[in-house]
Amino acid sequence: MGARALLLLLAAPALVCAATPREPRIVSINPCLDAVLVRVADPAQIASISAYSQDARSSSIPLALARRYPANAGTAEEVVALRPDLVVAGGHVAPATVAALKRLRVPLAQFAVPTTVEESVAQVRDLAARVGHPARGVALAARIEAAARQVRLMPVPALIFGAGGLVPGAGTLPDDLLTRAGFRNASAGYGLARWDVLPLEHLIAAPPRALFSVAAAEGGGERAEHHPALRRLAPRLTTVPFPARLMNCGGPTIVEAMALLRTARARFGEGR
C-alpha cells in the first residue's frame, strides 16, 4: 500500500466524524417547553430544564421524568455555566440572561404562549427541528392534531375555574380546547377579558352547565368548592376536576386535556 493510500485510510474515520454534526446541547428555562423538549430531543442533549418542572404544582411532565435532568432557575449565571448550544425560553426572559447569551453568541429561541392548537403544533415542529429531530416533531404534532380534532355537537356552556377564580377567556388556548371538545366558553357572558378573575358571587348567580375546577382536582380547599350555595347548584352544575397544568401549557399537554374534556362532554349527550 502506498504512503498516500495509507494516509487516506487513516484519515477516513476523522472525515466521517467531521461530516456528522454534533447534536445541539439544549437548556430550557420554560416548563411548557420542557414538556415538548423531553419528547423530541435525545436525553443526552438536554443539559437542564426549568426548576418549575420539578415542582408538582407547576410541572407539565411527570416528576420522575423531570428529576432525571438538572434544573435551573433561569438566571444568567446558571445558563452560561452550562455552556449550551441553544437556550429555549418563553416570551419573557430576564435582560441579564439575554445580554449574557448575546455576549457569548449562544442562540436564544423564544416561544410565545400559544393561543390556538395550530400555534402550539407549529411550536412543537419548530422546537423539534431546532434540536435536530424534525421527524419527532411531526409525529408529536400529528398526535396533538388528532386529539384536538373538532367535534360537531351542540355546545354546552362551560368554564375553566382556576386558582383564585382565574378564568381563561376568548383568545386563549383553553378556550380553543373547550370549543373543539363541544363546549362553549361562558366567560364572555360574565364580561371577562382574555384572562380574568370571576367573583364567586357572579358564578353562583349565573352558573354554566359544566365547571372545570382546578381546586376540585388538586384539593386546594378553595372557597368555591365548599360554598353551600354552589353545592346546591349540583343538579344544574356539573363540576369536573381539572388539573392546573392542563390550563397552563400547550404541546403534548393538549392530548391529556382533550381526553378529559371529551370524557366530560360525553355526560351531556348530543344536546345541551
Image (cartoon, grey):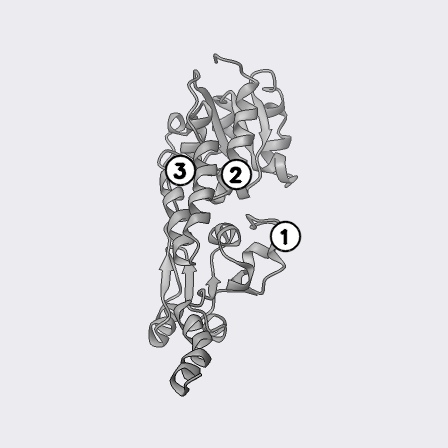
Q: Residue at position x 57%, y 25% from top?
A: 263
Q: Specify few, some or many for label 3: CA neighbours under 10 Å numbering under 14, 14-19, or 20 or more.
A: many
Q: Secondary structure at mark 3?
A: helix
Quadrant in the picture for the N terminus: bottom left
The answer to whether mark 1 and mark 3 are in CB contact below 8 A is no
Task: Name the secondary structure under disc 2.
Answer: loop
Which residue is painted at 51% across and 20% down in the image? 209
Question: Height in image: 216 above or below 153?
Answer: below
Q: In the picture provided, is 219 more to the left or to the right than 13?
A: right
Q: Which is nearer the N-term, disc 3 or disc 2?
A: 3
Of the residues shown, which amino acid type is indicated by label 1?
Answer: Leu
Q: Which residue is mark 1?
A: 63
Q: Nearer the viewer, residue 218 or 79?
A: 79
User: Of residues 186 and 58, which is closer to you in this image?
Assistant: 58
Q: Element type at marker 1?
A: helix
Mark nearer the N terminus (2 vs 1) = 1
Q: Quadrant of residue 70?
A: bottom right
Q: Which residue is mark 3?
A: 117
| Front residue of 27 and 167 | 27
